[in-house]
Image (cartoon, rainbow, N blue to C red):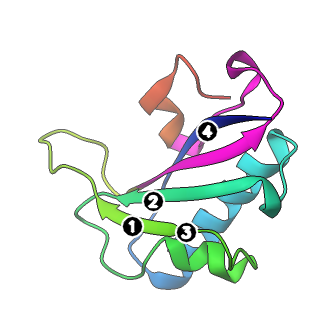
Amino acid sequence: MAVRAVRGAVQLERDEAGHLEDQVAALLTAILERNGLGADDLISIWFTATPDLHSAFPAAAARGLGITDVPLICAQELDIAGAMPRVVRILAHIESDLPKSGITHVYLGAAGALRKDIAQ
């Protein structure tokens, strides 16, 4: 079994805790489902949020899904002029038999514009 990384992002409509948690949970669920993964396949997850998001920790959404024994960390994205606002990104390290080319990176909604080369 190999260690792989899978990416994803979602743009929020507003900075509100419930909305953030719902959208991040949907993103993380999509990443797991599209890659045939379960919680036991997760090694660690990095969550980043743009500087305009203050309402909640994105990692709380993972805990709400029952992912309780995986190391999680939240960080802030760089504040770059012209960057897409209200975005939460995920970088998950996983154990998988999938080749790198078989990993499905998930960019929901408007966040698909961030990585048109790999967005599914």
Disc on the earlier residue, 3 or 2: 2
Q: Quadrant of residue 8?
A: top right
Q: Tags 4 and 2 in contact by the CB under 8 Å rule?
A: no
Secondary structure found at label 3: loop
Q: Is residue 19 visible?
A: no
Question: Which of label 4 and label 3 is nearer to you?
Answer: 3
Secondary element type, mark 4:
strand
When the figure is inspected, residue 45 is found, relative to residue 82, above or below; the finding is below
Q: Is residue 61 above or below residue 100?
A: below
Q: Relative to 83, is 9 on the left or the right?
A: right
Label 1: state its secondary structure: strand
- What's the distance in space between the residues labelled 4 and 3, CA to CA? 15 Å
Residue 7, position as x, y percentages in the image: 56, 40
> Is there CB contact under 8 Å for labels 2 and 1?
yes
Which amino acid does the dot numbered 3 rest on?
Pro
Residue located beneath label 3 in the image: 71
Q: Is the residue under label 1 in contact with that under label 4 (CB below 8 Å)?
A: no
Image position of 23 (left or right of 120): left
Q: Which residues are magenta?
A: 88-110
Residue 29 painted magenta: no
Front of the two marks 3 and 1: 3
> Residue drawn 64% across and 55% down?
43
Whichever of callouts 2 and 1 sits on the residue coming sooner in the sequence is 2
Label 2: which residue? 47
Alpha carbon distance from label 3 to label 1? 11 Å
Q: How far is mark 2 from mark 1, CA to CA?
A: 5 Å
Quadrant position of the C terminus in the picture: top right
User: Which residue bears the numbered disc 1?
Assistant: 74
The type of residue carrying mark 4 is: Val
